[in-house]
Amino acid sequence: MTELRCIDKEGSERIYLLTCDYDPHKGEFDYRVYSNPLPSSGGFFELSVKEVGDELQVISMNHNHMLEYKAKGIPDALLLYIAKHSGKSVRSSPAWGKGGEFRSTDATKVWDRLVAKNMALYFESEDLYRVSEKSS
């Protein structure tokens, strides 16, 4: 497992543990973030991305309603980590896209926070947010 350093909404640093699984048939990466030490509940924060051209697109982001993963800065650190280690931009889904793809209101709040911190850019013409390796 890899360590992931996150800054929560109170400004405190926390170190989480990170795993990543890749499904080559779907072109999807599934990142799981666990509290450190590992929780007895087995719970985790999950973020999945899929390859879309030369970018990665977030297809799900979920703290699984667990307080130990909510408001801890995990998406902020994880999206930058993915961009840096993949060498690719990581983009949001559009608010409403093709094939039932969409960006939830909660996900939009995460992306807006990243824009406010100069960690992401919003591209209005595409209705997409992007984090790149250069943002990290």
Image (cartoon, rainbow, N blue to C red):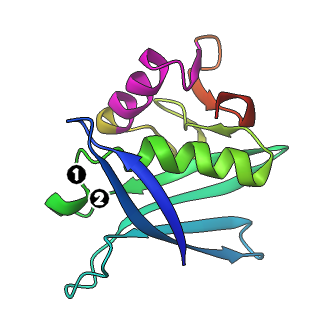
Say if mark 2 contacts mark 1, CB within 8 Å. yes
Element marked by disc 1: loop
Question: In the image, is residue 96 above or below residue 18?
Answer: above
Which residue matches tag 1?
70
Measured as percent of width and height from the top left, residue 21 is found at 62, 77
Residue at the bottom extreme of this rendering: 40
Whichever of callouts 2 and 1 sits on the residue coming sooner in the sequence is: 2
Image x and y of residue 26, in percent? 71, 70
Horizontal side of 34 relative to 51 (left or right) equals: left
Q: Amino acid at mark 1?
A: Lys
Crowd band around label 1 with a 10 angstrom C-alpha radius: few (<14), some (14–19), many (20+): some
User: Which one is nearer the viewer's eye here, 9 or 55?
Assistant: 9
Magenta span includes 50: no
Q: Quadrant of residue 117?
A: top left
For the residues marked 2 and 1, what is the alpha-carbon distance in whole angstroms?
A: 6 Å
Instruction: Say which residue label 2 marks.
Output: 63
What residue is drawn where x is 56% and y is 68%?
A: 30
